[in-house]
């Protein structure tokens, strides 16, 4: 028999034998016998070298076509046999399709997201809407329009990451160091209407990382602008916030402070939620915990936002998000928030 005839003979035998295979082991044996490394088709293909040169390409082509045909036929038969076996098992009740599946592990919201949502709900009750501003911010919004010109020493408090732009361009951009630039954006969009917004988001600083400080963290800014807004409104809002976030009966304390974009500027503390003001390690034995920087919106900032300071006034505050969450839930190190350790995350 010529090698060409042998090839056709192997093909016909293989296809016949395949229809007789009714089990998975039989199909595996078939595959080994015809298509395996030492199988009949492989052995014949190797014989190509004994043929005259001009016949070799035709032989090779035909051998390949047969190999593809047999491989496809084997796959089809395998699927058929598996399906038949499954139907048989099902008919005999060997597979219990009513067994419950393996449960999928459910995730949940990150502690930061949970805290942010609590803050949204608290301020929504007081009529503040959420206003989103960009993380990559123009230098002018982050500093100049907030009354912090290039030469101002306050810029040192908020060093940050710069986007590589034209070195002296008007449009120099940076990763915002606080959520305060959103004040200008919100005011410019709404002026000359009264306004009550919170501005949540991530902020970035060139900062030494410690147990209390990260180089990226969240803030929630608050801004209210109206015709009769006074410091009492600010203090009342902060007291209400302290009671709703940390628990009823909280006291607050107001200290004078300095921010270039508020005048006067204050820091607001609450009595320590752990010791109730007696003094403990969390409040460093002072009985007070800092909750926000705040103040009355500086007239220059009101003007930059499009409001006439002779007619309008406003208050603003800036809260951290991780630090209040640390106090409320007793988290000792801010680095846990970004450590991605499930043992930490699962506790909340
Ligand atoms: C500001 O960023 C001002 N923009 C706040 C402000 C807004 C004042 C409006 C007046 C009016 P400060 O740098 O203090 O201020 O940051 C505000 C809060 O962010 C802090 O009270 C603290 O809770 C949080 N915070 C500051 N630095 C870090 C840090 N490195 N890691 C984590 N939280 C921080």
Image (cartoon, grey):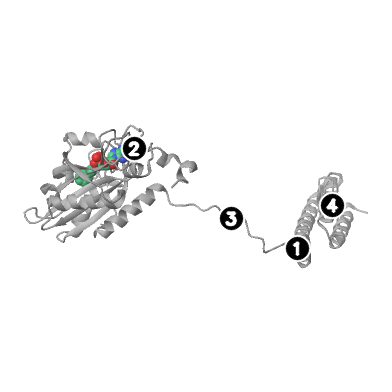
Within 10 Å of disc 2 (Cα), the crowding (few <14, some 14-19, many 20+) is some
Q: Residue 99: where, in percent of width, then height? A: 67, 61
Kindly identify which numbered label has been placed on residue 136.
none
User: Would the CB of label 2 be found within 8 Å of ligand 1?
Assistant: yes
- Give the mark nearer the N terminus: 1 vs 2: 1
Depth order, front residue of 119/303: 119
- Give the mark nearer the N terminus: 4 vs 2: 4
Pointers 3 and 4 in contact (C-beta within 8 Å)? no
- Give the mark nearer the N terminus: 1 vs 3: 1
- Give the mark nearer the N terminus: 3 vs 4: 4
Residue most toward the bottom?
Answer: 91
Kindly identify which numbered label has been placed on residue 86.
1
Left or right for 329, reference 314: right
Label 2: element kind:
loop
Which residue is pictured at 15% across the width and 43% down the height? 265
Within 10 Å of disc 4 (Cα), the crowding (few <14, some 14-19, many 20+) is few
In the picture, the quarter occupied by the N terminus is bottom right
Left or right for 232, reference 206: left
Whether residue 161 appears in this view of the structure is: no
Label 3: element kind:
loop
Label 1: element kind:
helix
Left or right for 90, reference 171: right
């Amino acid at each position: 028999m010529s090698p060409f005839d042998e090839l056709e003979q192997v093909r016909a035998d293989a296809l016949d034998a395949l229809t007789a295979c009714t089990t998975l082991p039989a199909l595996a044996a078939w595959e080994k016998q015809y298509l395996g490394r030492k199988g009949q088709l492989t052995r014949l293909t190797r014989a190509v070298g004994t043929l005259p040169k001009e016949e070799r390409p035709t032989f090779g082509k035909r051998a390949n076509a047969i190999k593809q045909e047999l491989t496809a036929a084997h796959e089809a038969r395998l699927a058929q046999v598996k399906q038949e076996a499954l139907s048989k098992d099902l008919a005999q009740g060997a597979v219990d399709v009513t067994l419950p599946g393996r449960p999928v592990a459910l995730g949940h919201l990150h502690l930061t997201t949970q805290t942010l949502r609590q803050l949204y709900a608290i301020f929504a009750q007081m009529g503040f809407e959420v206003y989103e501003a960009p993380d990559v911010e123009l230098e002018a919004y982050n500093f100049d329009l907030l009354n912090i010109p290039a030469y101002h020493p306050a810029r040192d408090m908020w060093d940050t990451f710069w986007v590589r732009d034209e070195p002296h361009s008007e449009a120099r951009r940076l990763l915002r160091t606080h959520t305060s630039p959103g004040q200008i954006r919100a005011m410019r969009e709404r002026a000359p209407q009264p306004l009550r917004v919170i501005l949540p988001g991530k902020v970035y600083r060139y900062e030494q990382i410690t147990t209390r400080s990260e180089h990226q963290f969240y803030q929630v800014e608050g801004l209210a602008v109206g015709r009769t807004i006074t410091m009492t409104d600010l203090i009342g809002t902060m007291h209400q916030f302290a009671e709703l976030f940390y628990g009823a009966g909280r006291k607050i304390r107001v200290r004078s402070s300095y921010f270039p974009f508020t005048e006067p500027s204050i820091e607001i503390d609450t009595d320590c939620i752990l010791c109730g003001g007696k003094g403990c390690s969390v409040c460093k034995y002072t009985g007070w915990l800092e909750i926000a920087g705040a103040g009355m919106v500086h007239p220059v900032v009101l003007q930059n936002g499009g409001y006439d300071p002779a007619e309008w006034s406003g208050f603003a505050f800036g809260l951290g998000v991780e630090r209040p969450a640390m106090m409320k839930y007793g988290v000792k190190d801010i680095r846990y928030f970004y450590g991605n350790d499930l043992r930490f995350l699962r506790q909340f």
